[in-house]
Image: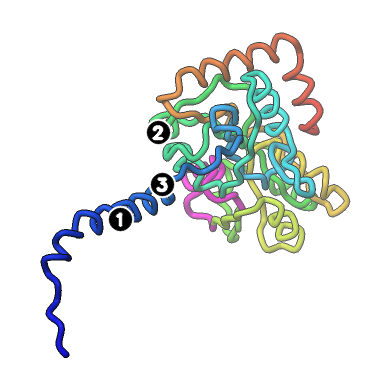
Amino acid sequence: MDRKFDWAGLMRRMPAVVLAVALVFCSCETAQRKPLPVQHTKTDENVLKVGVSPNTPPIIFKQGVEVAGLEADLARGLAAHLGKEVRFIEIPWGELINRLQNKRIDIIMSGMSITQGRRYRFAFSDAYYKTGLLALFRSEDRRRFREGWEGSLLEEEYYLNIGVEKGTVAEKWVRDNLPKLRLVPYMNPAKSASDLQYGLIDIFIHDAPVIYMLAAENEAKGLIPSRTFLQEYAYAWGLRKDSPELISSANAYIETIRKNGRLDALIKQWIPK
């Protein structure tokens, strides 16, 4: 026998049904919104994020898994001065400035020289080390590259291959002063020593500390440094212009270690002459 659907009964029960559905929905929503347990980790305010390209000993390089060198020791000292933990962020040289401007790092401490072009893009700390460009070449070419050699290179009839690290002051100097000679860019200065030894390049130009180190490591292979700077400049640290407190603290740290002799001691420890 057919039964008629009890619409009147359903309508009488509707408030209770709606309330039950609402309670179920609310309980699910509450469960989904239950706060996650708090994780007790150090915030970025307690960390100094230091951008480095660790491929230029003795300034900044890797010893096993550790970042080492003059800049590494200075970074640890600056972090301690600020009461922070240091965190090294390894970045290819050509990307350091962009990472700084995008606030991925707080400071560049990677043997960066002060140039007018860079000053337009970011701020520098006070200079902490005066240096310049030197050249590395084979000992049998010492007469060929005697003092003042750079002025006569363009008059030479033979073809020269000049090695530089890409994106450095050395590359700009060669492009500006020796535009007719063949420039060979390297991503890592260490590779240049073997290429120089086997005649793939005729000369390698870089910052003096790097040239001193390469010459010391390859003395037995007949590689020697030039004696006079091709260009003089100074190292400093790169910071964003909107970080006045960090700029002031970095300069205060440099002044402190300059006065107490710590800066001099670190330079002598890391840079052979």
Type of residue at label 3?
A: Arg
Percent of width and height locating residue 222:
83, 52
The mark tally for this picture is 3
Whichever of callouts 2 and 1 sits on the residue coming sooner in the sequence is: 1
Which type of secondary structure does the marked residue at label 3 adopt? loop
Residues rendered magenta in the picture: 163-182
Q: Residues within 10 Å of mark 3 (few under 14, many from 20)?
A: few
- Magenta span includes 218: no
Residue 130, image x, y percentages: 63, 24
Amino acid tagged 2: Arg
Instruction: Tell me which numbered mark, 3 or 2, is placed earlier along the sequence.
Output: 3
Residue located 49% across and 29% down the image = 239
Regarding mark 2 in the picture, which secondary structure is present there? helix
Q: Is residue 18 left or right of residue 202?
A: left
Residue at 52%, 32% in the rendered image: 106
Q: In the rendered image, which residue does mark 2 sit on?
A: 121
The image quadrant that residue 183 belongs to is bottom right
| Residue that extends furthest to the bottom in the rendered view of this protein | 1
Tell me which label, 1 or 3, sits earlier in the chain: 1
Is residue 199 at least partly visible in the picture?
A: yes
Q: Quadrant of the N terminus?
A: bottom left
Query: Between marks 2 and 1, how big is the CA–CA gap?
Result: 63 Å
Which residue is at 61% across, 46% downward? 90
Give SS at disc 1: helix
Judging by the rendered image, the residue that carries numbered circle 3 is 33
Q: Are marks 2 and 1 in contact (CB under 8 Å)?
A: no
Residue 168 part of the magenta-drawn span? yes
